[in-house]
Image (cartoon, rainbow, N blue to C red):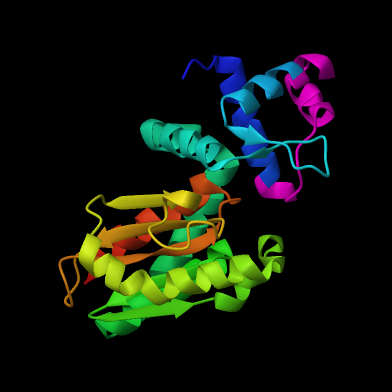
Amino acid sequence: MNITERQKAILFAIIEEYAEMAAPVGSVTLAKLFNVSSATIRSEMGKLEEMGLVAQPHTSAGRIPTDAGYRLYVNSLAEQGNDQISTIDDKIIDRSAHALEVRVNSQSRADFAIRGAVDSLVELTGNLGLATIGDQLYLAGISRLFTQPEFMDNSRVRSVAKLLDNLEPWLREASPGEPLNIFIGHENPIGKTSGVSLIISKFRSPFSDKSYIGVLGPTRQNYSRVMSLVRHAGNMLEEIL
């Protein structure tokens, strides 16, 4: 894919604005951000759309990211580590990581520690939290997930429910091997049309060498923050347990 640095910067700005506002991002907003004309932004957005990285909902002139656009963004975050996270985000992540640690360290049993970490991820990200505890899948925050605007559509809710019903056996069978695994939208093994991202960290626990903790949320989310917190939760649980 032949994408310029400016096009990449515009794509990433669309992703970050959309995560914040939950509404298609227009050329006027981006023109102010990049200090160029709206016509220039519209031209670049058109090229991004041709590349399949953004889409234009029929009800709006603005653009929203596609799964492919999110994948490019997430890969860039993973390659650059924390370099792309602002100082403000860094402070928020530090405070959130500390809250996670306090919650987990107050537990005397391994299963309670894992549940505590999941409950913290729910509170800190607004997503559904999940973890494997032995052969069981612990879920928390389902109501939080379904209050997101993406899930006003009942077909999406059913697709998410199907994914959750099949997630534990899929994790056991597929055993994703990376320390941090990210499945965006159609990349999910089940519920491909549900419009969610599954972000999970693998860790060793007394229950299994391949335990998992993570979140399930809309594809529209703050990936840099959520990825950092899920990675931290996995590392912390492995260290403590």
In the rendering, at what x and y percent does residue 192 appear?
48, 57
In the rendering, at what x and y percent does residue 23 appear?
76, 47
In the rendering, at what x and y percent does residue 70 appear?
52, 40
Q: In which quarter of the image is residue 38?
A: top right
Identify the main secondary structure in magenta: helix
Q: Is residue 88 above or below residue 49?
A: below
- The answer to whether residue 239 of the structure is visible from this angle is no
Q: In this view, does 91 lie above or below 40?
A: below
Which residue is found at the position 55% from the left and 16% from the top?
A: 5
Q: In this view, does 31 lie above or below 241?
A: above
In the rendered image, residue 27 lying in the magenta stretch gets the answer yes
Judged left or right of residue 186, residue 151 is right
- The answer to whether residue 127 of the structure is visible from this angle is yes
Of residues 3 and 77, the one nearer the viewer is 3
Which residue is found at the position 57% from the left and 49% from the top?
A: 222
Of residues 31 and 135, the one nearer the viewer is 135
Judged left or right of residue 17, residue 138 is left
Of residues 179 and 196, the one nearer the viewer is 196
Q: Quadrant of residue 26?
A: top right
In the rendered image, residue 228 lying in the magenta stretch gets the answer no
Q: In which quarter of the image is residue 218?
A: bottom right
Query: Which quadrant is the C terminus positioned in?
Result: bottom left
In this picture, which residue range is highlighted in magenta? Answer: 19-42
In the rendering, at what x and y percent does residue 39 appear?
82, 16
Of residues 190 and 107, the one nearer the viewer is 190
